[in-house]
Image (spheres, rainbow, N blue to C red):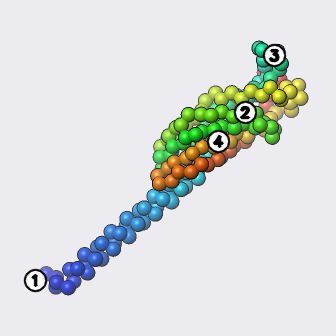
Amino acid sequence: MGEPETQRPRRVQALIVIALLVVLATATAYAVMSDASVRGLTVRISNPIRTCSIDSLTDARMVTFSLSAIVYSTHSLRTSISQVRLQLAADGVAVGTANETDRAFDPGQGTSYSTLLFKDPVLDPSNLPPSSNLVLAITAQVSAGFYRMKTTASDSQVVSSGTGC
């Protein structure tokens, strides 16, 4: 009745092989998603403003760039960023760097760093073009799933003169 004794071990072996293949396929898919989530780090400039003001200590005119940075991953795993460094350049000139707090976000979500101020006493407001091409770069240690690596992403946007320029 039932199966012959010689077929039972083969069936068990086949089930073990199938289970191992499923585990391997799942681990491989998760590893690919981890890598894609880390490499998919994206930054976007939001609400950039260029203003000119007078430094209260030196009475020199100074250019200030104010903006928000929106950070997300283009892929589908929970992502965390640490050792966050945001660097701004205007028309090819480095304006400033901001070290920011660690953050984490779920798939389909992101995080923002609001009201970042970059002041540059070297840029001469009287010699500025009517608009500036801003490049914001983020460098961070990015973790998602199995993977963790240092990654850099950037975005550019043109901003027109604000008050006092």
Q: Earlier in the sequence, mark 2 or mark 1?
A: 1
Query: Which residue is nearer to you in this view: 154 or 83?
Result: 83
Query: Residue at coordinates 78% horizontally, 28% vertically from top-left?
Result: 120
- The part of the image, by quadrant, that contains residue 95 is top right
Q: CA distance from mark 4 to mark 2?
A: 12 Å
Q: Does residue 105 lie above or below 123 as drawn?
A: below
Q: CA distance from mark 2 to mark 1?
A: 81 Å
SS for tag 3? Answer: loop
Q: Amino acid at mark 1?
A: Met
In this rendering, which labeled residue sits more in front, label 2 or label 1? 2
Query: Which residue is nearer to you in this view: 77 or 83?
Result: 83
Kindly indicate whether the residue at mark 2 contacts the one at mark 4 (C-beta within 8 angstroms): no
Mark linked to residue 1: 1
Q: Does residue 97 lie above or below 74 as drawn?
A: above
Q: Amino acid at mark 2?
A: Gly
- Answer few, some or many: residues within 10 Å of disc 4's Cα (few below 14, many 20 plus, some between 14 and 19): many
Q: Earlier in the sequence, mark 3 or mark 4?
A: 3
Q: Earlier in the sequence, mark 3 or mark 1?
A: 1
Side of 50 relative to 41 (left or right):
right
Q: Which residue is mark 3?
A: 58
Asked if residue 74 shows in the view, the reply is: no
Q: Position of residue 12 (x, y in %)?
A: 25, 75
SS for tag 2? Answer: strand
Q: Position of residue 164 (x, y in %)?
A: 81, 20
Query: Residue at coordinates 50% horizontally, 50% vertically from top-left?
Result: 144
Q: Which residue is mark 2?
A: 96
Q: CA distance from mark 3 to mark 4?
A: 31 Å
SS for tag 4? Answer: strand
Q: Amino acid at mark 4?
A: Ile
